[in-house]
Amino acid sequence: MTKGKSIYNKSLELRSEEHQEKVLIIKNVPRYPEIIDKGTSAFLHNPAFAASNRIKYE
């Protein structure tokens, strides 16, 4: 792993190594300062308004 990566990036990298058969794509992740400025609720969507085929439960 590259020096300077966040714990989040490291965990994604490890997950990708362990589960190479499953692709995980993450886009538009806000940076820490933006989350602090806007709060977490600014980045969450109400699942009641989402298409049912886009909601996954495990």
Image (cartoon, rainbow, N blue to C red):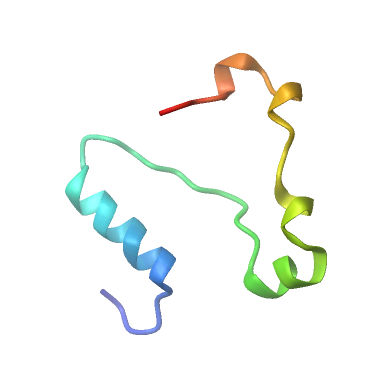
Please count the marks in the image: 0
Q: Residue at x 68, y 28 (%)?
A: 47
Q: Position of residue 3 (x, y in %)?
A: 33, 84
- Dividing the picture into quadrants, the one containing residue 33 is bottom right
Q: Position of residue 13 (x, y in %)?
A: 30, 59
For the C terminus, give its image quadrant. top left
Q: Is residue 7 left or right of residue 26?
A: left
Please determine whether, in this image, residue 16 is positioned above or below residue 51: below
Q: Is residue 15 left or right of residue 33?
A: left
Please determine whether, in this image, residue 57 is positioned above or below residue 1: above
Q: Position of residue 14 (x, y in %)?
A: 25, 58
For the N terminus, give its image quadrant. bottom left
Residue extending farthest front: 58
Q: Residue at x 61, y 15 (%)?
A: 52
Q: Position of residue 11 (x, y in %)?
A: 33, 61
Residue extending farthest top: 52
Q: Residue at x 71, y 66 (%)?
A: 35
Q: Residue at x 47, y 26 (%)?
A: 57
Please determine whether, in this image, residue 23 is positioned above or below residue 16: above
Most foreground residue, 28 or 43: 43
- Dividing the picture into quadrants, the one containing residue 8 is bottom left
Most foreground residue, 48 or 11: 48
